[in-house]
Image (cartoon, rainbow, N blue to C red):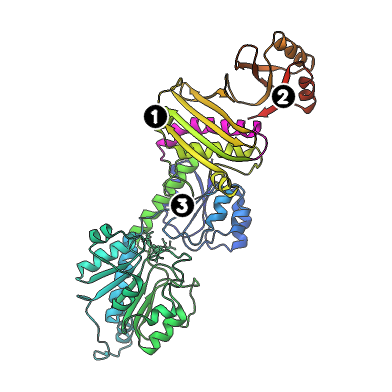
């Protein structure tokens, strides 16, 4: 039974769903990185929010881990390249908390416009400072969105409802989408110069880090109010403090900080500064949504191989997964076969599908071929990290889908480019489920690829099979299955024999000694 650790506070629905789906679950929050590293080895899945940092050290200790599920959007707390290299799928729930976070940005915009937190504190302190708090209206003001994705577009929609003019800077925002959203697409300098309010809704990346740098903050309109419900690190906090003190920035509201938990900051206590402790996603509705989604997605992956909302592998629905499963077994065997049989440097690989296979999602088939191919040399490879390793090694991977009808109702062909030329193997599924080799290096040969096998290429001549059988009998090698194919009568023949024990170097040497033998190898699947 797969086992999952929930390491951040999560709605109880998550644990309930894991259990209902046959996944064992522990909920242990608040552990230090060392404590987490010490315990993570026993888990197949790790469900997190933003507190747990899934670093390379944690991933190195996570010897059984298959999936990290983020109940929320931002995954900047997960080392995705390390997870990919380790073959761990990283998934998030990209929509479950977007409305809630957009509403928090709007709430903070109102808080700034009317100085609500300060007015509340003063009133409750018995001061009744009616003349101290003079607000601004939102109607007709310009709201500048930095980042117009899921959350940004909900904020734009709500702001338009408040009769604000919305301008947006987002390099990936198409003019059509901007029209649909009712926003004006602008460049960053224009946004800085025109916005009365600025709200940030981008992920934290190398491109967005410090996007509101000191220089950019100085380019803003005097009296601007700034809201950040996205990520700490998008704003230069020290420069923001100075500009609040100078009055150039009339107000700033931060839900997120460079260092979290933010228990101290030069910004704390600054006039017109409002803060919340990373509460953007904290409503009961959003937390139920993301808990349900993350548990469903992780259980799908652990139980049936379905992949949804993964950031480092292509999606595969829970419906597609069972259909693809036998193909992935076939693909892995074909990859392994070419990997074992091909010597010298591989520069490229082509994966072709035809017949029923051409109707399917080809990405998982390709990943399985690559995993089979590379597992010959590295045993830590799996379907998740195989494409990354292939890329790292400069392997040119080509996918071809044929519409034509071939000899088989379904076929997967793998061709590798080697120093010695192209080498191709092909296989089908018998009864739609049993992987079967049907062609090897241009020779038609039908074989199950399973267990230990002896591969022999010899000159097709009378008496050879008898001599080989006698030798194997003398050596005490039991033959399970026997598959034979040849290019032309009297030409080159291929023998694939399944044997009960691994083929030894001694046996290979003896078979090589038989007249007419060109190649002998032991294979295993
Ligand atoms: N405070 C909180 O509790 C929460 C914070 N968030 C954060 O909100 C952020 C946005 O989330 P979503 O809207 O769902 O993401 P999204 O991926 O739908 O949208 C992000 C947008 O940023 C844009 N973008 C990327 N690089 C950019 C750049 N250099 N300049 C301008 N725009 C750029 C993208 O094109 C995209 O449209 C994420 O960082 C997420 O972690 C999300 C949920 C809760
Ligand atoms: O979903 C996100 O990106 C968030 O920032 C929410 O963070 P949280 O799950 O509340 O720690």
Q: Residue furthest top?
A: 462
Classify mark 2 as within 8 Å of ligand 1 or not, answering yes or no: no
Picture quarter with ligand 1: bottom left
| Res 97 → quadrant | bottom left
Residue 298 higher or lower than 373, as above or below: below
Q: Which residue is mark 3?
A: 311
Q: CA distance from mark 3 to mark 2?
A: 43 Å
Q: Residue at x 34, y 80 (%)?
A: 220
Q: CA distance from mark 1 to mark 3?
A: 30 Å
Examine the structure image and report whether residue 56 is included in the region drawn in magenta.
no
* The one of 420 and 416 positioned closer to us in this rendering: 420
Examine the structure image and report whether residue 328 is included in the region drawn in magenta.
yes
* The one of 86 and 6 positioned closer to us in this rendering: 86
Residue stretch rendered in magenta on the structure: 317-345
Q: Which residue is mark 2?
A: 520
* The one of 129 and 327 positioned closer to us in this rendering: 327
Q: Residue at x 62, y 16 (%)?
A: 484
**How many residues crowd mark 2 within 10 Å: few (<14), some (14–19), many (20+)?**
some
Disc 1 to disc 3: CB gap under 8 Å? no
Residue 99 seen from this side: yes
Classify mark 3 as within 8 Å of ligand 1 or not, answering yes or no: no
| Res 473 → quadrant | top right
Q: Earlier in the sequence, mark 1 or mark 3?
A: 3
Q: Which residue is mark 1?
A: 403
x and y, in percent, of residue 7 in the image: 51, 57
Which SS class for mark 2? strand
x and y, in percent, of residue 256 in the image: 43, 71
């Amino acid at each position: 039974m797969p086992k999952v650790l929930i390491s951040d506070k999560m709605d109880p629905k998550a644990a309930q769903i894991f259990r209902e789906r046959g996944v064992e679950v522990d909920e242990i929050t608040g552990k230090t990185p060392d404590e987490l590293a010490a315990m993570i080895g026993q888990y197949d899945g790790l469900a997190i929010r933003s507190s747990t940092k899934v670093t390379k050290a944690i991933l190195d200790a996570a010897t059984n881990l298959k999936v990290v599920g983020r109940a929320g959007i931002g995954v900047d707390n997960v080392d995705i390249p390390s997870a990919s290299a380790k073959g761990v799928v990283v998934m998030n729930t990209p929509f479950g908390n977007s409305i809630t976070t957009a509403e928090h940005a709007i709430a903070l915009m109102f808080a700034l416009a009317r100085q609500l937190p300060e007015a509340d504190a003063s009133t409750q302190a018995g001061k009744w400072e009616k003349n101290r708090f003079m607000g601004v209206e939102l109607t007709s003001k310009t709201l500048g969105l930095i980042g117009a994705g899921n959350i940004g577009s909900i904020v734009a929609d709500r702001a338009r409802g408040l009769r604000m003019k919305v301008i947006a800077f987002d390099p990936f925002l198409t003019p059509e989408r901007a029209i649909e959203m009712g926003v004006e697409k602008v460049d960053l300098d224009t946004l800085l110069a025109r916005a009365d309010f600025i709200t940030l809704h981008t992920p934290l990346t190398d491109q967005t880090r410090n996007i509101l740098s000191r220089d950019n903050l100085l380019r803003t309109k005097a009296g601007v109010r700034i809201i950040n419900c996205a990520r700490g690190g998008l704003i230069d906090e020290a420069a923001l403090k100075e500009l609040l003190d100078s009055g150039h920035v009339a107000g700033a509201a931060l839900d997120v900080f460079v260092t979290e938990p933010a228990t101290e900051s030069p910004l704390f206590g600054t006039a017109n500064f409002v803060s919340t402790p990373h509460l953007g996603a904290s409503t009961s509705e959003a937390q139920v949504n993301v808990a349900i989604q993350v548990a469903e997605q992780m259980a799908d992956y652990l139980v049936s191989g379905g992949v949804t909302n993964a950031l480092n592998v292509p999606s595969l629905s829970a419906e597609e997964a069972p259909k693809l499963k036998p193909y992935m077994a076939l693909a892995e065997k074909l990859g392994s076969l070419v990997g074992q049989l091909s010597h010298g440097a591989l520069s490229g690989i082509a994966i072709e599908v035809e017949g029923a296979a051409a109707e399917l999602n080809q990405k998982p088939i390709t990943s399985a071929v690559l995993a089979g191919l590379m597992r010959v040399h590295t045993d830590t490879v799996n379907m998740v990290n195989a494409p990354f390793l292939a890329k790292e090694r400069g392997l040119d991977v080509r996918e071809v889908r044929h519409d034509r009808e071939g000899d088989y109702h379904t076929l997967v062909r793998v061709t590798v480019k080697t120093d010695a030329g192209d080498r191709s193997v092909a296989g089908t599924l018998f009864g739609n489920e049993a992987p079967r080799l049907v062609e090897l290096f241009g020779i038609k040969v039908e074989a199950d690829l399973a267990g230990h096998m002896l591969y022999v290429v010899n000159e097709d001549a009378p008496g050879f099979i008898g001599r080989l059988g006698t030798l194997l009998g003398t050596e005490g090698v039991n033959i399970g299955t026997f598959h034979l194919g040849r290019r032309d009568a009297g030409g080159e023949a291929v023998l694939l024999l399944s044997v009960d024990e691994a083929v030894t170097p001694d046996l290979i040497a003896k078979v090589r000694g038989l007249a007419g033998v060109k190649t002998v190898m032991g294979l295993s699947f």
